[in-house]
Image (cartoon, rainbow, N blue to C red):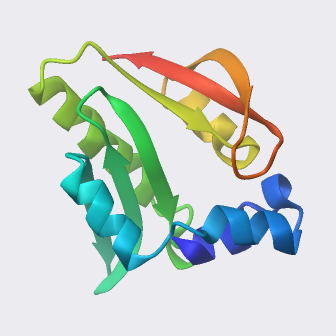
């Protein structure tokens, strides 16, 4: 997840060390445990025996994580992760999923059927972020 942010989200952080430090601050084992304890569905995808992606969704249908390893980019792993999270949302009886996207991932989510639902300022980058929704 840390490599995904550092290497793939350059358009969002601009290689600014302060922005990166802020964004990466909660990407650690203790945070993962707290996400699990909070009731979030956390998924890990493997490819060739290595972690290829990490995804998480709250019981409300909010997708809070979808990060792919740079080594697995463009291999369908993020699409599979989103399909698994959306399937879990359907199993919970939810009618939609929603998320906040970076500029880097915005086109990806549009291709998956998510639609823009406004903007907000990213807590990590202090730049606009895309609020998005998808009917399931």
Depicted 115 relative to depicted 68: above or below: above
Instruction: Tell me: residue 73, above or below residue 95.
Output: below
Q: Position of residue 6 (x, y in %)?
A: 70, 73
- At horizontal 89% and vertical 68% (from top left) the residue drawn is 16
Front one among 23 and 133: 23
Q: Position of residue 73 (x, y in %)?
A: 56, 66
How many discs appear?
0
Front residue of 26/86: it is: 26
Side of 55 where 93 appears, left or right = left
Task: Decide: is 53 above or below 66.
Answer: below
- Taking depth in this image into account, of 118 and 39 the one nearest to the observer is 39
Image position, residue 55 (x, y; %): 37, 54
Q: Residue at x 55, y 61 (%)?
A: 74
Residue at (75% x, 42% y) in the render: 103
Q: Is residue 7 left or right of residue 127?
A: left
Residue drawn at the location 62% of the way across and 38% of the way down: 101
Quadrant for residue 46, please give it: bottom left
Residue 83 in percent (x, y) is at: 30, 40
- Asked where in the image residue 50 lies, by quadrant, the reply is bottom left
In which quadrant of the rendered image does the C terminus lie?
top left
């Amino acid at each position: 997840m840390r490599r995904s942010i550092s290497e793939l989200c350059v358009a969002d952080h601009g290689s600014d060390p302060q922005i990166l430090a802020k964004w990466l601050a909660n990407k650690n084992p203790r945070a993962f445990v707290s996400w699990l304890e909070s009731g979030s569905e956390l998924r890990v995808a493997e490819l060739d025996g290595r972690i290829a992606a990490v995804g998480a969704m709250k019981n409300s249908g909010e997708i809070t994580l979808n990060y792919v390893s740079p080594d697995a980019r463009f291999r369908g792993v993020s699409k599979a992760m989103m399909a698994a999270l959306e399937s879990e949302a359907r199993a919970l009886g939810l009618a939609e999923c929603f998320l906040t996207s970076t500029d880097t991932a915005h086109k990806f989510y549009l291709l998956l059927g998510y639609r823009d639902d406004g903007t907000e300022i990213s807590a990590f980058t202090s730049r606009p972020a895309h609020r998005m929704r998808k009917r399931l």
